[in-house]
Image (tube, helix red, strand yellow):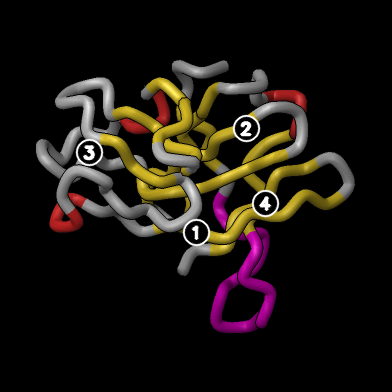
């Protein structure tokens, strides 16, 4: 499942609803300690599952190259922060904030994640 881009457009026109959440996949579709890429409102979003119950979402675009690859990065801990290492230049992105630890200029946008009825949902920020 990690190689695929999961695409779930909003069920209704965003102008007619106040619900910002978009379902992206089932919880069990994401293997613990990995990420997937989801297409949410036309944007590539990396959704990560850390352990059994922690979920994070950030823009999937590598800030140095523009390649849509962050969902394939390695998850780890650095200085007490949960991070993903970009598969290209290995910069570390904090999964909670989207901050690049090596250079804030290479930070990405973090998004909200919720679990509802076994579904992972993302709200773009």
For label 1, the residue is: 111
Percent position (x, y) of residue 60? 35, 41
**Distance of label 4 from label 3 (alpha carbons):** 22 Å
Q: Which residue is mark 4?
A: 121
Q: Rounded to the nearest whole Å, what is the CA distance between mark 4 and mark 2?
A: 12 Å
Magenta span has 95?
no
Who comes first in sequence, dot 2 or dot 3? 2
For the N terminus, give its image quadrant.
top right
Q: Main secondary structure of the magenta part?
A: loop
Q: Residue at x 14, y 57 (%)?
A: 105
- Give the Cα distance between marks 1 and 2: 14 Å
Task: Please name the residue that numbered disc 2 is placed on.
Answer: 49
Q: Residues within 10 Å of mark 2 (few under 14, many from 20)?
A: many
Badge 3 or badge 1: first in the primary sequence:
3
Residue 62: mark in rendering:
3
Q: Is residue 39 visible?
A: no
Q: Secondary structure at mark 4?
A: strand
Residue 101 pos. (x, y %): 27, 46
């Amino acid at each position: 499942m990690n190689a695929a881009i999961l695409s779930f457009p909003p069920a209704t026109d965003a102008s007619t609803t106040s619900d910002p959440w978009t379902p992206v996949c089932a919880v069990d579709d994401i293997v613990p300690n990995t990420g997937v890429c989801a297409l949410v409102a036309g944007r590539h979003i990396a959704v990560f599952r850390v352990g059994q119950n922690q979920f994070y979402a950030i823009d999937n675009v590598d800030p140095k190259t523009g390649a849509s690859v962050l969902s394939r990065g390695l998850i780890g801990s650095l200085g007490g922060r949960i991070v993903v290492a970009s598969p290209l230049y290995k910069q570390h992105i904090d999964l909670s904030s989207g901050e690049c630890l090596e250079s804030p200029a290479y930070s990405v946008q973090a998004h909200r994640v919720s679990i509802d009825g076994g579904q992972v949902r993302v709200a773009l920020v």
